[in-house]
Amino acid sequence: MKKQNTINKINLALNKIRPFLQQDGGDVELVDFNKKTGVVSVRLQGHCAGCLMAEVTLKNGIERIIKQDVPEVKEVIAS
């Protein structure tokens, strides 16, 4: 049950970020959350998938917001 609550919180955080990504023709999808390691896997979509700034967006945008809103998350990676 706790994992599901964490996943809901992660999705809420992603919903905060999503409009900014969609503005540039991209999006993000939650792939997995490993509660043992605290690692979230996401898939960048649309223009974000092939963008040269994807790693910056992932770490400075997506990861920062998720970690701020969901303290049990330790890292966000692209899958």
Image (tube, grey):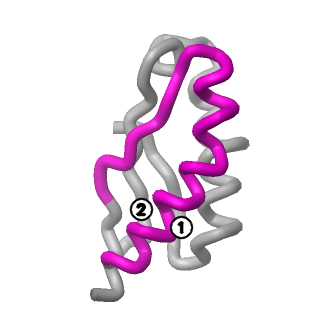
The answer to whether residue 36 shows anywhere in this view is no
- Viewport quadrant of the N terminus: bottom left
Label 2 vs 1, first from the N-terminus: 2
Number of numbered discs visible in the structure rendering? 2
In percent of the image, x 38 and y 71: which residue is there? 37
Q: Which mark is residue 74?
A: 1
Q: Residue at x 72, y 42 (%)?
A: 60
Residue type, label 1: Lys
Q: Is residue 8 on the magenta stretch?
A: yes
Q: Magenta segment, principal secondary structure?
A: helix
**In the rendered structure, which amino acid carries the disc numbered 2?**
Val
Q: Is residue 36 above or below residue 46?
A: below
Q: Is residue 16 magenta?
A: yes
Task: Decide if residue 31 is on the left or right side of residue 16.
Answer: left
Q: Which residues are magenta?
A: 4-32
Rendered-image quadrant of the C terminus: top left
Left/right placement of residue 26 relative to residue 57 reads left
Q: Using the numbered discs, state the Cα–Cα distance from disc 2 to disc 1 in whole angstroms.
A: 6 Å
State which quadrant residue 7 falls in: bottom left
> Depth check: 56 or 23 in front?
23
Which residue lies under the disc numbered 2?
39
Which numbered dot is residue 46? none
User: In the displayed image of the protein, which residue is found farthest to the bottom?
Assistant: 1
x and y percent of residue 39 in the render?
42, 62
3 shown above or below 53:
below
Looking at the image, do the residues carrying marks 2 and 1 touch, with CB atoms under 8 Å apart? yes
**Residue 8 visible in the snapshot:** yes
